[in-house]
Amino acid sequence: MKTFLQRPVHIMAFAVGLLSVVPAALAQDVTLKMWTLDNPGYPEFIAQAAEAFKKTHPDVTIEHQTFPGDAYKTSLPVALVGSDAPDVFFNWSGDAAKRLVRDGLALGITDAAMAKGGFGTELGAGLLDAFRYDGKLYGAAADAVSKYVFYNKDYFATNKIALPKTMAELAGVCKAVRAIDPDTVPMPLGNKTRWKAIHWMTMLNERVMGIDGTAADYDLARPADALFTDPGYAQAFDELLKLQDAGCFEEAPNATEYTVADAMFATQASPMEFCGTWCTAGLDAAGFTNYGFFRLPLVEGGKGDAGANFLVPEGFQVSSKTQHAKEAVEWISFLVSPEQGAKFAELTKFLPSNPKMIDSVPNATPQFREIVADMGTFTRGVNVLDVLLEASVADAYLNATVEVLNRTVTPAEAVAQIRQAALAAQAKLPAK
Amino acid sequence: MTDVTQQEPRSPRGRRDVLSGAMLLPALVLVGLFILAPAAYAIVGSFFEFTITSRNWVFVGFGNYARAAGDPVFWTALRNNAFLIVGSAITQVGLGTILAAILDRGVRRGNAIYRTIIFMPVVVSSIAVAFVWILILDPNVGPLNAIVKSLGFRPPKLGWLGDPQISLWMLLVIAAWQNVGFQMILVLAGLQSIPKELYEAAALDGARGFRAFRYITLPGIRNVLIVGTLITVVGGLKVFDLVFVTTGGGPANATQVLGTYSYLQAFRLGNMGYANAMSVVLLAIAVLFGWLQLRLSRKA
């Protein structure tokens, strides 16, 4: 009588059975450590996504940590060079991401991203470019933020104020508001932490010189003798000063917290604010619903494109030190899937990079839907200067803008300061 | 020839030394790990150019120190540190001494309540103090502007923290508000340790008022004043959190101190070597003041 193992059919069946069991037995639990900002809704979004991800990846656990923006900017590089780096982390596109790529701390993930189910097959080319360096993908855009001039519809209707079409008309609106009540700040700025005014300069530079007119300066790619010499830079500062002269801003914008400026609009003490798409969450929370928005108007005679608007993609990158690159890319691909895009919009009120299912968001306000629709019509995105520029040039721009608003330097002197910083930064660039 | 293998029994003093050494060891290890090693790292790093994320350290010799010498913001930061040190010594130690004298001699009732109220800001975190003062000084919703306007004056056009000419003075005010209570308690303890009989004897000899203060009080609290001043000096040197939260070193670097400027260079602009060089300069100044403290204490 033949024993069990002497029968070839049994042996084969046993081997096949064994093969199907062994990988499951050998599969080890994977913990992906993820770092993000502490934006409202982020912990909830990641928590529900991690749970949903478990259905297809039962062996993967997500360990999520959040940080405030300022702390994040310093903690992330320190962690990435250390021994306990996060596997997946949030980052802004622009110089912040580029620096990590250059220093070998962000993993190139092109192949995995473009594989079936990878985020490369889901996101549009424009958004993929946000984290593309030297032709390789180093991250996935998760969302994009934009900025608009938000206005109080009731105030504008009651006082018969028309929406401005040019920057000169916007200054005219400020004068009209001051004429109604000199104590009303038409459009509070809140530049104590410097980034609010740099957002103005980001758009004013575009409105005066156009994206193509500034790109070579921003990349430090223009020859040294021509770097930041376009008179448009000083003109852009002049446009900011014209608004200040028209009484648009509060008296001491460099001493005013942005939160105070936000509160002035949300409580309807001020009828306008140039604010990010993230502001809608705050306005909803404050119970202010009757507001509209418009893009920053064009400068008369400028080279700006009405279709171009402020657009900063943010997303996720993978650490070059991760032991779980495959799972990390699968995780970020999952986060930017259409279903998770809708969840992202619902929980964070941010516009997801993948808005295919945005209509299914249950609690979206009319303004949120309008912003989503409007952002879909941008012809070009204008990335923000303090993220886009090399760090020392960005710092010089931030300081110069503060000084222009304080009237301690003229626009021409401010541009000279920026040019000096740009020349120093350009000199340090590796020779091509 | 002495037999080296044969050990003499340890004397009580020798045993005491070993025991002392053993007890000091944990502290020495901690000081070595968390103070000496990072200081040595900073000194070595100050001769290199590198970023926090780069693996390449480029030797630049004294390049970072030369850069500091030619950097106007470095000098602004150093000047601001000096301003805060001198200003804090005057406002905190001076005002603390006056308050202590008033509480020691002038206040008959409610002494403990006044003391508690004045001391209270000392136990509040600097970050919380900074945020409270940001609200007080806010040009739009802050109460200070409202008070100034109600008195018929015009508040500063660029704001208390937005005007480069005023913002540093405001930091001095905030630091004094927070720390004067500590100095007051220190001096008060010194004052109360002076025997009353000395004043009575001096009074019999005709020494009252300022003469009693000059010849009895001041020598009696001299040591306390030295310690208080040195604590203030060290506080002025290492100031970071208050400046970082209230002004961030602005407007346009006007309130940078070496701590915040080193942070900016290291973590925002990626110049770790340069930041190290500035830290070494700060360390050298701190060591100098430490040495002065030792000398003054010994003399006293």
Image (cartoon, rainbow, N blue to C red):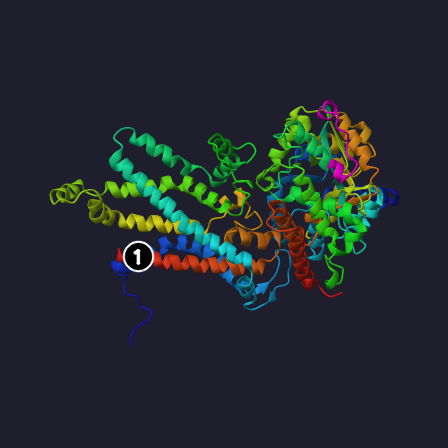
Q: From the image, which quarter does the C terminus of chain A lie in?
A: bottom right
Q: What x and y, as percent, mark residue B28?
A: 41, 55
- List the single residue furthest toward the right: A9
Badge 1 element:
helix
Mark 1, Cα crowd under 10 Å, few <14 / some 14-19 / many 20+, is: few
Q: Visible in this render: residue B260?
A: yes
Q: Amino acid at mark 1?
A: Leu
Q: Residue at x 29, y 55 (%)?
A: B297
Q: From the image, which quarter does the N terminus of chain A lie in?
A: top right
Q: Residue at x 20, y 46 (%)?
A: B211
Q: What x and y, as percent, mark residue B198?
A: 16, 44
Q: In the rendered picture of this protein, how many numbered marks are placed on residues? A: 1
- Would you name the residue on which mark 1 appears? B296
Q: Residue at x 56, y 69 (%)?
A: B61
Residue B262 position by quadrant: bottom right
Along the line of sight, the residue nearer the viewer: A380 or A285:
A380
Along the line of sight, the residue nearer the viewer: A4 or A108:
A108
The subunit carrying tag 1 is: B
Q: Magenta span covers which residues?
A: A155-170
Along the line of sight, the residue nearer the viewer: B219 or A12:
B219
Q: Is residue A32 magenta?
A: no
Q: Visible in this render: residue A355?
A: no
Q: Is residue A158 magenta?
A: yes
